Image (cartoon, rainbow, N blue to C red):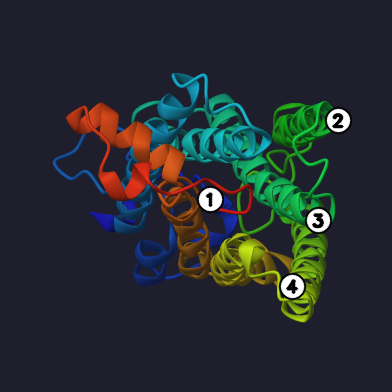
Amino acid sequence: MNEDLEVNLTWLPRDHLEAGSPENVSAAVTSLVPVGDPGPEFIVNPWDIVLCTSGTLISCENAVVVLIIFHNPSLRAPMFLLIGSLALADLLAGIGLIFNFILAYLLQSEATKLVTVGLIVASFSASVCSLLAITVDRYLSLYYALTYNSERTITFTYIMLILLWGASICIGLLPVMGWNCLQDESTCSVIRPLTKNNAAVLSVSFLLMFALMLQLYIQICKIVMRHAHQIALQHHFLATSHYVTTRKGVSTLAIILGTFAACWMPFTLYSLIADYTYPSIYTYATLLPATYNSIINPVIYAFRNQEIQKALWLICCGCIPSNLSARARSPSDV
């Protein structure tokens, strides 16, 4: 029966998997779906179920953040706009993972495959760019502390949002506009229908953005240490609490940077060295941790922020705990 089963592949080219043994095929293929006459067996790849579950969790978490920021006019500072952008990007990424699972098993067509992959690529690109934009915002809030809350900062934030979403949408449209490997599977990357060149550009872009984030983080640490040293010399202890909060923000950035690298670096490096001939189990094993970054982002960025915590408490129980209402918000409190 397995030898007669005709299948649809969403992540790997068909030629590569047909060349393998039945055991390797069952372990490597993505979204195996019978396309012939209906039979008693319906094969579902467990990796696809895990990705769909991850997408569902991503969507639920980030939908809460988007709704909170959208329905609270007080959350319109540059920091919250960027957090909202990150949450929206991760929300779309989660929806893309769910759609990819549903359409791969119910509606098998090249057009839907291009659209879902384009949505996923655009969403994750916007998520990574939003993380970079938040890092830039944290740097500006420290370097230009006196003028951070000016109209110029808000304008710059909107410019960053327009550029990052415009670039992400263009990247997502590339497979739909023809830059794909559907006509020549020898050019496929580890993610079908993306070409090897497309995957290489995305991977190199990620590495460049990570290097920029790391450099900004180092500069932030230098600024915080310099300010702390100046305060200690002047014995200006009244301002100490502000810089304690600032150091807390830097610690948060360190956690985020480490989490970001741990989640995305394996898939990025694998995409550079691998192609469609590699078993797809390696693609799943590196792609799945990348989706976890979108699960972790709301916990680190949104739910740790006291203003969002207040809004969440008001929605859930109609009150604000005294320990939250007594704390003062700082621009560095991410």
Q: Nearer the viewer, mark 4 or mark 3?
A: 4
Secondary element under disc 4, as helix, strand or loop, is helix
Q: Which residue is mark 2?
A: 152
Q: Which residue is mark 3?
A: 205
Please state, as top left, top right, bottom left or bottom right, where the N terminus lies in the image. Answer: bottom left
Secondary element under disc 1, as helix, strand or loop, is loop
Tell me if mark 2 has few (under 14), some (14-19) or many (20+) residues whose alpha carbon lies within 10 angstroms of its own.
Answer: few
Amino acid found under the numbered disc labelled 3:
Ser
Q: Nearer the viewer, mark 1 or mark 3?
A: 3
Q: Earlier in the sequence, mark 4 or mark 3?
A: 3
Residue at the image point whose x is 35% and y is 62% from the top: 26
Q: Earlier in the sequence, mark 1 or mark 2?
A: 1
Tell me if mark 1 has few (under 14), some (14-19) or many (20+) residues whose alpha carbon lies within 10 angstroms of its own.
Answer: many
Question: What is the x, y in percent for residue 320?
Answer: 27, 37
Between the C-alphas of marks 1 and 2, the distance is 44 Å
Q: Which residue is mark 4?
A: 231
Residue at the image point whose x is 68% and y is 35% from the top: 78
